[in-house]
Amino acid sequence: MSPAPHLVLREMTEEEWGELRRFIVRDYADAQVRAGSWDEDEALRRAETQMEEMMPEGRATQGKLLLSADNGDGERVGSLWLSIDERPSGPRGESWINYIEISAPFRGKGYGRALLSAAEETARAHGLRSIGLNVFAENTVARRLYDSAGFDVVTTWMRKSLEAT
């Protein structure tokens, strides 16, 4: 097994966030349509509404870390959007990976595992006790990575189409 590639996490710039935000909204809308959850004519509006609810202050939204991952050569290889629950009273909660991705030219080279590990380290550094994420069933590559990284399936949402085929 080759060593993990070097990653440097840094705060995402406003420009990077704007690009990523537009991509996430479109990609999420498309995924919901493919999954049969939303109609195509309403998907983009619904995805935009959810983004506004999750990130009302943009990059400045409390409890959200927006990070870019660069390799040792200064190239941006991926992005991470991590929600953190740092309630001061009671036990600290969970971190949540809202979005994690490695850019296409860098996939299959260990960067995904390295960025996932960096997300876990960031959560630990905030004193959090768990990390969670959602993944669509069709994303088998990501599911294999999460399984191999020790993530457990907590719930499974299933559906059967009743439309004639």
Image: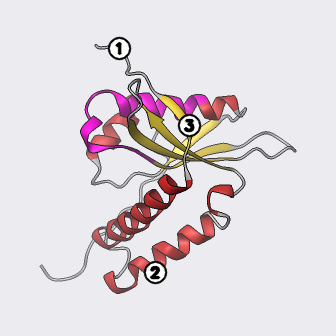
Task: Report how many numbered discs are placed on residues in the image.
Answer: 3
At a point 76% along the width and 44% down the height, the residue shown is: 86
Q: Which residue is mark 1?
A: 3
Query: Please, which colouring scheme is shown?
Result: secondary structure
Residue 47 in the image: x percent, y percent?
46, 72
Q: Quadrant of residue 39?
A: bottom left
In the rendered structure, the answer to whether residue 119 lies left or right of residue 4 reads right
Under mark 3, the amino acid is Arg
Under mark 2, the amino acid is Arg
Q: Earlier in the sequence, mark 1 or mark 2?
A: 1
At a point 39% along the width and 62% down the height, the residue shown is: 23
Residue 107 in magenta stretch: yes
Q: Quadrant of residue 11?
A: top right
Q: Nearer the viewer, residue 134 or 24?
A: 24
Q: Which residue is mark 3?
A: 10
SS category of the residue bearing label 2: helix
At a point 49% along the width and 44% down the height, the residue shown is: 80
How far is disc 3 from disc 2 in space, using C-alphas? Answer: 30 Å
Residue 56 in the image: x percent, y percent?
66, 67
Screen quadrant of the N terminus = top left
Q: Report if residue 149 is visible in the image.
A: no
Q: Residue furthest bottom?
A: 41
Q: Which residue is mark 2?
A: 45
Under mark 1, the amino acid is Pro
Q: Earlier in the sequence, mark 3 or mark 1?
A: 1
Please state the extent of the stretch shown in magenta in the rendering: 100-121
Residue 156 tag number? none
Residue 66 in the image: x percent, y percent?
57, 48
